[in-house]
Image (cartoon, rainbow, N blue to C red):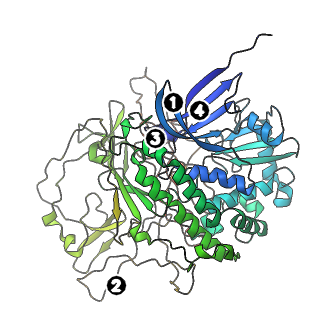
Amino acid sequence: KKTKKPSIKLSIGGKYTQVFEKQQYNIKINNGELFGRQQIRLRSETVDPSFLRSKIGYDLCNVLGLPSVQASYTIVYINDDNMGLYLIRDVPKSQWFEYTFGIYNSTYIYKCDSKYGSSYYFNCINESTEEPADASLQELNAKFEKANNQEEISKFFDTDLYIKWQVYKYLTGSWDHVTIQHNQYLFYNEISGKWMNFLYDFDSDFGAYKSPNPNLSFTEESLEMGLPLYQKLGLSNHHEQLVNTIKEFVLNGFNPVKLIPRIDELLDYLYPYVLEDRTPEKETTKRPGHFVRPEYKIENGFGIADHIKNAGFYNYYLKKYYDTKNFNVDEIYGLKRWIIERFRFVCKKYEIDCSFAQKYLEGGSYRVPDLTKYKVEMEQRLGGCKDTGYHCCSDPNAYVYTTDDTGDWGIEGNFWCLIVKEEEPIVEEECWALERGYPCCEYNTEVFYTSSNGKTWSVENDEWCGIINTTGKKKTTTTTTTTTTTTTTTTTTTTTTTTTTTPTAQPTGGNGYYEPPPYDPNDPNSVYIPPPPFFDPDDPNQGPPPPPPYGGYGGGYYDPNYEPKPYDPNDPNSQYIPPPPNGGQGGYYPPPNGGQGGYYQPPPNGGQGGQGGYYQPPPNGGQGGQGGYYQPPPNGGQGGRQGGGNN
């Protein structure tokens, strides 16, 4: 009998991560195995300064009894070229399900992603047939629609496992595993007769990105309270099984007694490998396995110091400008800081006896350093016209196709360009607001407040700014032309000041503003929200104005009926419209909690996604939108930046 030779397929892995210099790889082996596996994933962990989040996540799943893939570390060589340090893990494919559940060659394995459908339950594609929403999945979603409560759902779906995953997501601060979206598999267990879900990819867990806050309850933090599956299961702080699972996980795995020593062990082991992988510090494309990409990302520059600091107590603040003045801030908690602070909060909130970890509790011998002295700020600019990453239009009077808070956008040569009008530059000497400690507005002239002496104020970048009246003055031309070369200034600073990176005017999830409850220093769940910083010195009897009337930058509302007129290259009157420059069409998150968008995709396929609104629990706030996710026409369109829910 003739033996078939093994064949190996190596491909680029990941979706958004392909924008980074260090690529991820997928390995598929036909007629053979490597480490007992036919499929392997090599993950660069570029977005994680600590290089530890995924490994700690998979280890925690093993400790807690959650069925999960295995992960370790490896140095990768391709044709004898050192590609650097990678996280290596197996894949939840048919072989993994055979090893884990004893079911051979299952045809009921589904990979889930919101791009595969619009269900409020699961949107998945069959791994065998590559058919989205096949008959089996449609039947499952129909059963969800018909069922009314947990008892009915548990007859065909493993609700115990699902609830455990929701608790895992809560404890680790996960925002990247929303049920209707991606990073999970769905599987029909023919032995139990029930469907099961499995999560993977934990590099953005443990307080990484978005707006992490370890002092929120399950109900306050969850992005899914408005989803019908959550509502039918009754998941909240009052769900007895969920609360008992929180207690179980805290006692058995998610606690600093188990996790802090594990982090220290991995730090000692990985140090020489991370040092080699993330050196040199400045010329990142000379690092192992790094390739020049069209657009530089701040995450490419994480070094060995960031590995050590972020594995501990240093919080990272990534300030990402999408034009000269406007920016989003991504916060990445120190890994140990997140674990200890979330542990302390849940012990108190859910009345768990955590005396076994007494030294890690408040007042214990293990001290958590003051955050004001343990923060790292990094900055990224895109270059191009007003730091947008795009050209300036050569014609300042070009036709305006769309407008956002950066300005007006035109099209030249089938590419978006920023229209720069002839306008008078604002000089510091004319900025009367500087005397009051505020800048003058560069773009916005919408009046939000008028002081007693007639001076008018607006808001830019969530900060008050003074409006300069330039009526009747001679204007000068400020039109510039740039090349497509992207330049980035990245600055790493360890600060010891008490200046915060959050905007002074807090976004609140939509139009209007949130009026916080009075601060109670005796209530550990009460949060102090300072008043707006502005005070009018020209009127001593006048108090500060209300917060700016705008909420956070939410994702766009996805309209499945959107159908643009198709571009016909043979029709001289038909015009090609390139992808929107700033954001994209967000997915729709059901009321009452606002509109949740998708995720950022870089130019030329996406653009700058909107930042999520500032969350305050309903009924006063509502869930703010996440960033825009571009889908090319006919399914996409321009995503809004204005806030999520109108609460």
**Chain-order first, disc 3 or disc 1:** 1
- Work out whether 620 lies above or below 199: below
In the rendered image, the residue lying farthest to the bottom is 541
Mark 4 or mark 1: whose residue is earlier in sequence: 4
Quick one: label 2, few (<14), some, or many (20+) residues within 10 Å?
A: few
In the image, residue 342 lies at what x, y percent?
59, 68
- Residue type, numbered disc 4: Asn
Q: Residue at x 56, y 47 (%)?
A: 558
Separation of disc 4 and disc 3 at Cα? 24 Å
> Counting residues from the N terminus, which is met first, the one under dot 4 or under dot 3?
4
Mark 3 or mark 2: whose residue is earlier in sequence: 2
**Residue bearing mark 4:** 26
Q: Is residue 331 visible?
A: no
Residue 543's tag is 2
Q: Mark 2 against mark 1, which lies toward the viewer?
A: 1
On screen, 625 above or below 251? above
- In the image, 396 versus 389, the foreground residue is 389
As drawn, which residue projects farthest toward the top? 1
Above or below, 495 relative to 55:
below
Q: To which residue does mark 1 refer?
A: 77
For marks 2 and 1 on the same chain, the one whose residue lies earlier in the sequence: 1
Q: Residues within 10 Å of mark 1 (few under 14, many from 20)?
A: few
In the rendered image, which residue does mark 3 sit on?
606
Q: Amino acid at mark 2?
A: Gly
- For badge 1, the amino acid type reads Tyr
Q: CA distance from mark 4 to mark 1?
A: 14 Å
**Of label 4 and label 2, which has the lower sequence position?**
4
**Callout in the foreground (3, 2):** 3
Q: Are marks 3 and 2 in contact (CB under 8 Å)?
A: no
- The quadrant in which the N terminus is found is top right
Residue 124 is left or right of residue 368, and the answer is: right
